[in-house]
Amino acid sequence: MPTGDRGDGMESGRIQKTVNVVLCLAAVAGSIWGGTVIWEVLSNRHRINQACDDLVPARNVLALSPAGGDITHRLAEEGTIDLSQGLPQDCELFSTEAGEKIGSRTGSRWFFTGAVGALDQDDESPETPSSSVLNDGNPYKSTTHAAQPLGGGITGLVTDAGVTVFLPCPGGEVEGRRVKELWARAGLMTGRPFTAADQQITGADRDVLAETAALTANNLAERAGCPDRLPDAPEDIPALPEGTSPASQAKGTCAWYAENGFARRPAHPDEVLESRVDDRLPDERCVLFLSGSRASAATERNKGADRPRYGFREADWFVSFHTYRGVSADNVTLRSSGLPGSGTPAEPGTAGRSSQDPMWWASSVCAGNRPQVHTMTSSHAYDRVAPPRDLERLFRAYVQEVASRRDCAPAEFPPATDFAPPGEKD
């Protein structure tokens, strides 16, 4: 018995020693793994800060769903932020996790863009009213989501790929350039498998991007010497509505169309793409579409037009309205379908139409002495069959509603002759 007891004790000792060794190895392995993870996080943070000039909060970027693994950035000047080179600037980030999700041969994929800029009269990128509206001009995208105001006390815009915010900055300056208003954008590269089934980013990513954009704007405001800062971004930002809706039910930026009874007229547009109203945004948009039956009804009134019985595309039958306010209104150009770079300036205090395309503008001055430029762009298909008087009525109704809502002085409108085809003005 004593011998057996010693044998059991020795066996127990060996087991305990083995357990201790395993625990020690596990602890060492855990320390190495933990140290590796910590090093990877610190390294990723450093690369994000380096690429985005410490403007974009790295912890937010790392919280995005495609941000796992190794984070890298572009090495060229384009795609990294350097405020000494002026505004706008952006930083583009890649991750190995995003690369793995799509089977990238290079091992990583571009997944995030942070951008900053300023609005002023010297902006080199003119505002251009849309000439292609469904699917945002992307033929590979099957669903359109109208951008919506961010809310939460922030002037901002939520799209299906990111969030842009705006911050007034009277007296601000960035690298010797005077600025009046700053903007910041945080966006994800979209497409399967990074977006939800309805082709927009997930709710969790949407909230992170909103916070990222607001913090980025505040960081830029600090460097520019702006007196104000944005509040915390709202949470639980709702998904964007999908596609068009019946014109008779319009309640946002196209509400004027339903309220005036235009939707009941057989040859008028019967679908809308609209957003909620937020008069603080630099521009707002309302787009009207004709269904196949409405397009056929419109051509019935024009014997020289081909009826759209075959190959009908809703994207070819629209009339789009924009209003630009403040600084944005100082730099609106009606792009021409002719030579690149050509177009007609739509200046505050004036009104008219493009010399080549079915595009018109009006202007007004609203509360706070802010100039407003209002534009209407018709597709060539709809312009060929819409009576000039109908287009004029639509434009006047739209502009008058916006001007009334924004406490504007009477608007400057194009003359009635500008709504007739160019060859029929006389």
Image: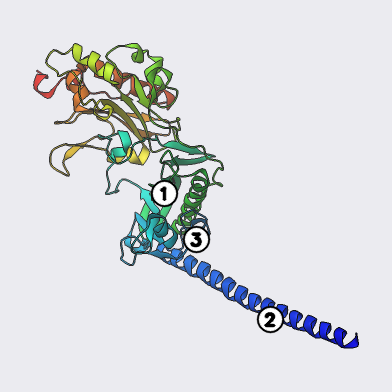
Which residue sits at x=15%, y=19%? 306
Q: Which residue is mark 1?
A: 193
Asked whether residue 24 appears in the rendered view, the answer is yes
- Residue 212 in the image: x percent, y percent? 49, 52
Q: Which residue is mark 3?
A: 58
**Comes first in the chain, label 3 or label 1:** 3
Local packing at callout 1 (Cα closer than 10 Å; few below 14, some 14-19, many 20+) is few
Q: Are the two marked residues, 3 and 1, in contact with CB atoms closer than 8 angstroms?
A: no
Measure the C-alpha gap from mark 1 to mark 2.
Answer: 44 Å
Q: Residue furthest right?
A: 1
Asked whether residue 410 appears in the rendered view, the answer is no
Query: What secondary structure is marked by label 1?
Result: loop
Give the amino acid type for the residue marked by disc 2 in the picture: Val
302, above or below 325, in the image: above
- Residue 51 in the image: x percent, y percent? 40, 64
Q: Point out the frontmost of discs 1 and 2.
A: 2
Give the amino acid type for the residue marked by disc 1 in the picture: Pro
Q: Are the two marked residues, 3 and 2, in contact with CB atoms closer than 8 angstroms?
A: no
Give the amino acid type for the residue marked by disc 3 in the picture: Ala
Which residue sits at x=13%, y=42%? 339
Measure the C-alpha gap from mark 3 to mark 2.
Answer: 39 Å
Query: What secondary structure is marked by label 3?
Result: helix
- Residue 149 in the image: x percent, y percent? 46, 36
Local packing at callout 3 (Cα closer than 10 Å; few below 14, some 14-19, many 20+) is some
Left or right: 130 in relation to 254 = left
Q: Which residue is mark 2?
A: 21
Image quadrant where one finds the C terminus: top left
